[in-house]
């Protein structure tokens, strides 16, 4: 278990390092990154200052070392738009992102798992067809559009929920649903097919032969085994879907998290801010993946090879 | 005792009659999705002929007209117009070009790279396999959308950047699948005999291994086109994909976002176009997969 933990940890660090390096090189792709870092309205003195600070007149490898040091210290430069350290906004906004992410995961699982289980247990029933149809449609509809439809229906027409911004629980529902949207259909389908496989196995037949009531067979015996491949095989995909989902949802609903900060920074050409947001989200992504990986290793010892 | 009388009343299924004539075979094709894809291809190829107006032609006096069936709309602009008076229907029709071509080109690029890597890793094994598969793992671990956003902000959003991003995102899956299959194919007798006969590795790979991989490649590609279209639309919507005023569907949805309550038609129709397109590709891909290799259901 310890070896498994260490190897996964090492992988996570390598991935983070790769993202950091890719960002470094992408910034220098067009030649001189001063334009990116200083913005269009920068004064000549500011540019000189930046050159000194990031060592831009030094050879590339030295720049890289300086850069790595800065990243480690959390110094991502100064935001062109706000004039403050780029990390400051990120630090202010990350709780919002976490909110939507967590609520999104909960809603997704609460919706997708029971429906998937039910569809498998009642295979061929109208609900099964409905669930499968919904899953097929759901994977074809882009999340950002779903979010806009939600706004149209719930905020504009029905006036039940707010169209954006942050506040109480009513502000979280729609963004959370939109964040999880990409993943719900996939998880539902996977749950259903995994359950179908498990329901055909010998110990389930034994349980039914013993006379156990259906819901005990389904939930206590079948589901526990079906859940492992569902929750873990799809983990990497689901986490990246959630990353995309939260960036999209925050933009659509103007929710003040790191995702919308990222898109804002792109629009306003505020590269230092962009860099800070990207690196933060990458770290979050890698961390969550690591957590899921370790959970997988804990739940299913066969994986630890 | 069993009798033969009931046999005429058995329900007939297309599969049961397979091999007897064209129509039963046709019935097992996913006709509706294929029809939709056909329509889309026509839309993409013949856009200048089909669209009533050029997609970027502005017409300010006629701006923000609702669709034809709503009060204030007219058949001049069946889907209405946007903030600059551009016809929404024309933009959606032209959008098919952009979305389809990006997705197809990107999947082709990803497939080519992934297959090459998978073949080399699977066939030659050893150090090359180790290194290549580690690279594949590395690419899979990096959050692609973030890299896409950084790329768009440094190089500027563009058609080719989107193709690069999607290609980079999708090639590892091909590599993994192709490597796994190459590993098993290379143990087949005809491959071993070819090696003994002195065929060069290149010849073996292209003449013996590659043709056996075609079914898997087709399945993977058809399953991924749909998600590539959604990814491109998402990137364009966020402003890091195809840049406006190019009428990519994601761009049109973004155009309408500020006026959702008053001019809902601008965002609605391109979204429907995306959903219908992706649905058609997904259903076709599922059918291809079921036909060629049901074992791939996990994908």
Image: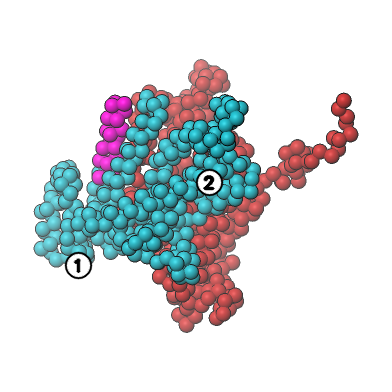
Chain colours: A cyan, B red
Tell me where residue A44 appears, x and y as whole percent.
Answer: 13, 64
Mark identifier at residue A115: 2
The residue positioned 50% from the left and 74% from the top of the image is B81
Q: Which chain is indicated by disc 1?
A: A
Residue identified by numbered label 1:
A41
The residue positioned farthest toward the bottom in the image shown: B61
The residue positioned 28% from the left and 54% from the top of the image is A95
Camera-nearest label, 2 or 1: 2
Question: Dot 1 lies on which element?
Answer: loop
The answer to which of marks 2 and 1 sits earlier in the sequence is: 1
Crowd around label 1: few <14 · some 14–19 · many ≥20 (10 Å): few
Tell me where residue A146 appears, x and y as whole percent.
Answer: 47, 59
Q: Is residue A199 left or right of residue A267?
A: right
Tell me where residue B83 appears, x and y as whole percent.
Answer: 44, 75
Predominant SS of the magenta segment: helix
| Above or below, comparing residue A175 to residue A114 in the picture | below
Is the Cβ of the residue at disc 2 closer than 8 Å to that at disc 1? no
The residue positioned 56% from the left and 28% from the top of the image is A207
Q: Is residue A79 left or right of residue A155?
A: left
Total labels drawn: 2
The residue positioned 37% from the left and 59% from the top of the image is A169
Residue B91 visible:
yes
| Above or below, comparing residue A82 to residue A295 in the picture | below
Q: Which chain is indicated by disc 2?
A: A
Res B40 quadrant in image: bottom right
Q: Is residue A162 left or right of residue B217?
A: left
Out of A124 and A204, give the one closest to the viewer: A204
The residue positioned farthest toward the top in the image shown: B196
Q: Give the magenta-colored segment's residue range.
A: A1-20
Q: Quadrant of the N terminus of chain B?
A: top right
Out of A79 and A4, give the one closest to the viewer: A4
Does the stretch in magenta take in A12? Answer: yes
């Amino acid at each position: 278990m310890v070896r498994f933990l260490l190897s996964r940890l090492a992988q996570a660090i390598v991935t983070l390092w790769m993202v950091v390096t890719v960002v470094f090189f992408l910034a220098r792709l067009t030649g001189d990154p001063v334009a990116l870092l200083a913005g269009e309205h920068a004064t000549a003195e500011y540019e000189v200052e930046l050159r000194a600070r990031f060592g831009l007149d030094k050879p590339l490898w030295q720049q890289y070392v300086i850069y790595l040091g800065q990243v480690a210290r959390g110094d991502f430069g100064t935001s062109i738009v706000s004039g403050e350290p780029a990390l400051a906004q990120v630090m202010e906004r990350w709780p919002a992102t976490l909110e939507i992410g967590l609520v999104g995961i909960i809603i997704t699982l609460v919706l997708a798992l029971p429906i998937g289980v039910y569809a498998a247990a009642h295979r061929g029933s109208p609900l099964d067809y409905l669930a499968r149809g919904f899953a097929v449609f759901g994977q074809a509809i882009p999340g950002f559009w779903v979010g806009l439809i939600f706004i149209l229906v719930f905020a504009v027409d029905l006036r039940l929920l707010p169209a954006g911004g942050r506040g109480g629980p009513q502000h979280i529902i729609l963004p959370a649903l939109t964040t999880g949207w990409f993943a719900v259909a996939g998880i539902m389908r996977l749950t259903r097919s995994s359950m179908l496989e498990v329901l055909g196995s010998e110990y389930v037949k034994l349980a039914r032969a013993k006379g156990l009531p259906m819901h005990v067979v389904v939930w206590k015996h079948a589901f526990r085994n079906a859940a492992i491949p569902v929750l873990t095989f799809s983990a990497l995909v689901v986490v990246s879907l959630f990353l995309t989902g939260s960036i999209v949802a925050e933009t659509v609903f103007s929710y003040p998290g790191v995702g919308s900060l990222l898109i804002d920074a792109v629009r306003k050409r505020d590269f230092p801010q962009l860099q800070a947001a990207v690196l933060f989200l990458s770290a979050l992504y890698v961390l969550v993946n690591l957590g899921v990986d370790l959970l997988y290793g804990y739940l299913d010892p066969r994986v630890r090879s | 005792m069993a009798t033969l009388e009931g046999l005429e009343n058995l329900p007939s299924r297309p599969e049961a009659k397979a091999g007897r004539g064209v129509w039963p075979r046709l019935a097992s094709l996913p006709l509706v999705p294929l029809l939709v894809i056909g329509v889309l291809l026509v839309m993409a190829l013949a856009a200048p002929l089909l669209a009533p107006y050029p997609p970027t032609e502005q017409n300010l006096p006629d701006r923000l007209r609702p669709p034809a069936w709503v009060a204030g709309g007219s058949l001049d602009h069946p889907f209405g117009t946007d903030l600059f008076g551009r016809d929404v229907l024309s933009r959606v029709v032209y959008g098919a070009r952009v979305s389809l071509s990006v997705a197809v080109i990107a999947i082709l690029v990803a497939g080519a790279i992934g297959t090459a890597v998978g073949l080399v890793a699977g066939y030659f094994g050893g150090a090359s396999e180790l290194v290549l598969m580690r690279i594949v793992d590395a690419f899979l671990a990096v959050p692609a959308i973030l890299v896409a956003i950084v790329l768009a902000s440094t190089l500027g959003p563009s058609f080719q950047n989107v193709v690069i991003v999607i290609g980079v995102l999708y090639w590892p899956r091909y590599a993994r699948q192709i490597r796994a299959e190459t590993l098993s194919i290379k143990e087949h007798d005809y491959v071993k005999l070819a090696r003994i006969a002195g065929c060069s590795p290149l010849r073996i790979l292209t003449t013996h291994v590659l043709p056996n991989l075609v079914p898997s490649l087709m399945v993977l590609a058809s399953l991924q086109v749909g998600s590539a279209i959604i990814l491109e639309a998402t990137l364009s919507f966020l402003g890091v994909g195809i840049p406006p005023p190019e009428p990519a569907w994601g761009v049109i949805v973004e155009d309408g976002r500020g006026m959702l309550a008053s001019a809902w038609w601008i965002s609605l129709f391109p979204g429907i176009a995306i959903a219908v397109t992706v649905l058609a590709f997904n259903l076709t891909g599922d059918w291809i997969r079921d036909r060629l290799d049901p074992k791939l259901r996990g994908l």
